[in-house]
Image: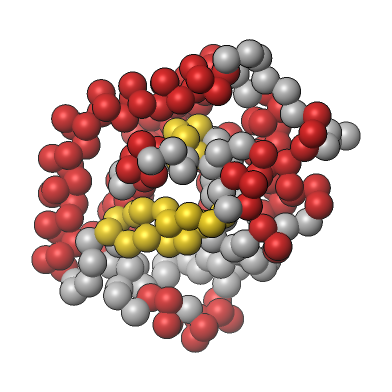
Amino acid sequence: MTRSPGMVRTAPHYAVAKRALDLLICLAALPIVLPVALLAGLLIRLESPGPVVFAQMRTGRHGARFPMFKFRTMVRNAEELKASLQHLNILPAPDFKIPNDPRITRVGGFLRKTSLDELPQILNVLRGEMTIVGPRPTSFAASTYELWHSERLEVLPGITGLWQIKGRGSMTFDERLRLDIEYIERRSLLLDLKLIVLTGLAVFRGSGA
């Protein structure tokens, strides 16, 4: 049985240690991330017009909305085309996913496969809107959630987590929620470090994250 949000417990000082780990990893990664980000940005601009980075409103801790940054992987009018492709959606609402999405550019496909499109979220982590490990923020508002979903809103959203390792886009929203809640109820610095390592391995194999 899932515990109520008010029953979520963590070890003392976990939040401070987790924030310190986030900052340490982000700052240590900058010398590698910056050249890769510059190259990715150049390739995006060479292939198609439009911004290199876009901000999509996502739902974070306590249901607060914030702009999450990603490299643009689709054509500039992707959102306008969404309605005309709704009949190809293979996941139940509120998710939206279609196989071989025609809106994705060639460079965008590579960035998604390698998870490099997520690199700009380092800025979200530095701003304190996200953490490295946590439930993935949804594009739909908290009003869409059912009551049992709300536990995931007790913590900062993350770049990676349990469902990125175990299934990524093949899972339904409810399946992902169950893994998010499992993470919240088990979370510790050791688990965070383990998931960061597993994320790196999954990205290297092209199987997740």
Task: Report the residue that reaches farthest toward the right.
Answer: 1
Q: Is residue 135 above or below residue 43?
A: above
Query: In the rendered view, how is the structure colored?
Result: secondary structure
Picture coordinates of residue 185, whole percent (x, y): 71, 27
Q: Is residue 78 above or below residue 24?
A: below
Q: Nearer the viewer, residue 181 or 6?
A: 6
Residue at image location 43% in from the left, 82% down from the top: 81
Where is residue 71, by image quadrant?
Answer: bottom left
Where is residue 106, by image quadrant?
Answer: bottom left
Is 30 situated left or right of 189 in this image? left
Question: Which quarter shows the C terminus?
Answer: top left
Residue at image location 18% in from the left, 74% down from the top: 49
Q: Is residue 43 visible?
A: yes
Residue at image location 80% in from the left, 47% down from the top: 148
Picture coordinates of residue 64, whole percent (x, y): 58, 53
Q: Nearer the viewer, residue 4 or 165?
A: 4
Q: Nearer the viewer, residue 31 or 100?
A: 31
Q: Is residue 63 above or below residue 124?
A: below
Question: Which quarter shows the N terminus?
Answer: top right
Is 52 situated left or right of 158 in this image? left
Picture coordinates of residue 127, whole percent (x, y): 38, 41
Q: Is residue 176 visible?
A: no
Q: Is residue 103 above or below residue 145?
A: below
Residue at image location 32% in from the left, 51% down from the top: 117
Picture coordinates of residue 24, whole percent (x, y): 33, 21
